[in-house]
Amino acid sequence: TRRSYHEKVLDHYSNPRNVGSMSKADTDVGTGLVGAPACGDVMKLQIRVDPTNNTISDVKFKTFGCGSAIASSSYLTELVRGMTLEDAGKIRNTQIAQELCLPPVKLHCSMLAEDAIKSAISNYYIKNPTARPATNLAGTSASMPKVEVETVMEAPQVA
Ligand code: FES
């Protein structure tokens, strides 16, 4: 219903969970930085990984974007905490959009969250190559939007 759309999005928008940053230099931290070409909104998502079991022990985000993008990233941080990297890499934006009841015009906002977690996982694997599952070569790293990260770096004014 429209009511539940407003409740969930507004809840995450007005009380976003896990806002913040971690040190990019830490080897157990993966950083994803992505942008939505359509609107210029930007999302940074960082995961800290427990190397003993490849699960996400902590997660932080900063989103300079619309309410739906902020809500999508806030919800995503709650979703991925405690997940294995493999499971977190399988999260699809449709799952986020369904949970938040986003309308079709806001689907790309949830896509930003899917891109961000994939990008963070990919960055972690680059820093920790031995952690990458051997059977997953065509998996999470494939869609890392490298070009968009370049664009994002030039757009701090959106803050
Ligand atoms: Fe672009 Fe929401 S309007 S991320």
Image (cartoon, rainbow, N blue to C red):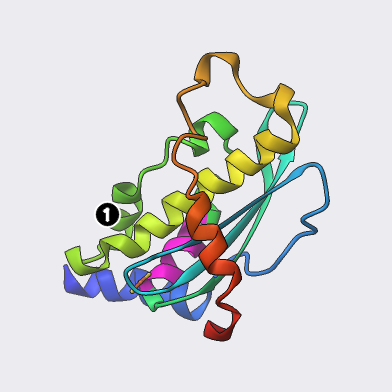
Residue at point 81%, 42% (across, down)? 27
Q: Which residue in the structure is indicated by mark 1?
A: 98
Magenta residues, as a range? 68-76
Q: Residue at x 71, y 27 (%)?
A: 129
Numbered disc 1: secondary structure: helix
Query: Of the residues shown, which amino acid type is indicated by label 1?
Result: Gln
* Front in this rendered view, residue 1 or 33: 33
Asked whether residue 82 appears in the rendered view, the answer is no
Nearest to the observer: residue 74 or residue 61 = 61
Q: Please state if 85 lies on the left or on the right of 148 as rendered.
A: right
Picture mark count: 1
Left or right of 130 on screen, residue 139? left
Classify residue 150 by image quadrant: bottom right
In the image, 73 versus 38, the foreground residue is 38
Asked whether residue 153 is in view, the answer is: yes
Q: Is residue 119 left or right of residue 59?
A: left
Quadrant of the image where one finds ligand 1: bottom left
Query: Does the magenta-highlighted stretch encompass residue 152?
Result: no
Q: Position of residue 70 (x, y in %)?
A: 46, 71
Q: Position of residue 97 (x, y in %)?
A: 30, 57
Q: Is residue 67 above or below residue 123?
A: below
Residue 141 sits above or below residue 70 on the image: above
Question: Residue 133 appears at what percent x and percent y?
Answer: 60, 20
Residue drawn at (44%, 73%) of the image: 41
Query: Farthest residue in the right direction?
Result: 26
